[in-house]
């Protein structure tokens, strides 16, 4: 089985965060093949850049985070490309109106549904939506 990594699992692996220990532990015990989307890469980059702008990270730390992320993802992760129909499926999820879901989470969930894998996220709301839709979660 494969496990799709939400950005909130990826970021703490490469930048000190309140979830760093949890992310490291979760990945240590995941036996699944790891999947990440190019959208996750963009979200990761956005978070790191924002931390530089807010002075939570120094430029050198951000560059190291990007480099470590790139090396790790090339070795450990299968990259899945965001497709235009993922956006259409995410839009359909949001238009249901019964799901408390934001656009980025809807895009990730649409991709997980397309790929047919489990989801690893620390976002309780996203996990709840995934369960409602019958998506299997990685226990963490």
Image (tube, rainbow, N blue to C red):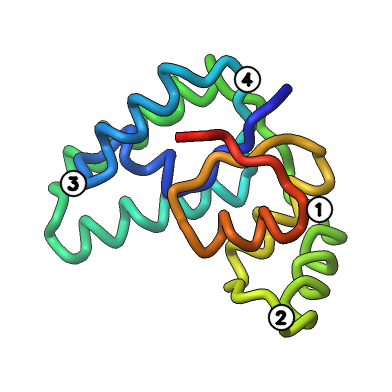
The span from disc 1 to disc 4 (Cα, nearest Å) is: 23 Å
State the image quarter where residue 94 is shown: bottom right
| 74 w.r.t. 79: above or below | above
Q: Are marks 3 and 4 in contact (CB under 8 Å)?
A: no
Label drawn at residue 59: 3
Q: Nearer the viewer, mark 1 or mark 2?
A: 2
Q: Nearer the viewer, mark 3 or mark 4?
A: 4
| 32 w.r.t. 11: above or below | above
Pick whichever of labels 1 and 2 is earlier in the sequence.
Answer: 1
Q: Are marks 1 and 4 in contact (CB under 8 Å)?
A: no
Residue marked by disc 1: 83
Could you tell whether 115 is left or right of 98 in the image? right
Residue marked by disc 4: 32
Pick whichever of labels 3 and 4 is earlier in the sequence.
Answer: 4
From the viewer's side, name the closer residue of 53 and 6: 6
The span from disc 1 to disc 2 (Cα, nearest Å) is: 24 Å
Label drawn at residue 98: 2
From the viewer's side, name the closer residue of 33 and 22: 22
The span from disc 3 to disc 2 (Cα, nearest Å) is: 42 Å
Could you tell me which residue is drawn at 84 percent across and 68 percent down? Answer: 88
Q: Position of residue 40 (x, y in %)?
A: 55, 47
Crowd around label 4: few <14 · some 14–19 · many ≥20 (10 Å): some
Picture quarter with the N terminus: top right
Please tell me whether mark 1 sits on a helix, a strand or a loop: loop
The span from disc 3 to disc 4 (Cα, nearest Å) is: 33 Å
Q: Are marks 3 and 2 in contact (CB under 8 Å)?
A: no
């Amino acid at each position: 089985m494969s496990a799709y990594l939400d950005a909130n699992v990826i970021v703490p692996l490469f930048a000190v965060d309140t979830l760093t220990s949890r992310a490291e532990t979760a990945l240590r015990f995941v036996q699944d093949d790891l999947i990440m989307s190019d959208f996750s890469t963009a979200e990761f980059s956005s978070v790191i850049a924002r931390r530089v702008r807010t002075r939570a990270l120094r430029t050198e730390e951000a560059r190291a985070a990007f480099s470590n992320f790139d090396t790790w993802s090339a070795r450990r992760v299968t990259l899945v490309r965001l497709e235009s129909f993922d956006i259409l499926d995410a839009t359909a999820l949001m238009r249901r109106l019964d799901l408390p879901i934001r656009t980025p989470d809807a895009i990730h969930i649409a991709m997980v549904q397309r790929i047919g894998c489990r989801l690893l996220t620390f976002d309780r709301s996203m996990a709840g939506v995934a369960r409602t839709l019958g998506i299997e979660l990685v226990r963490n």
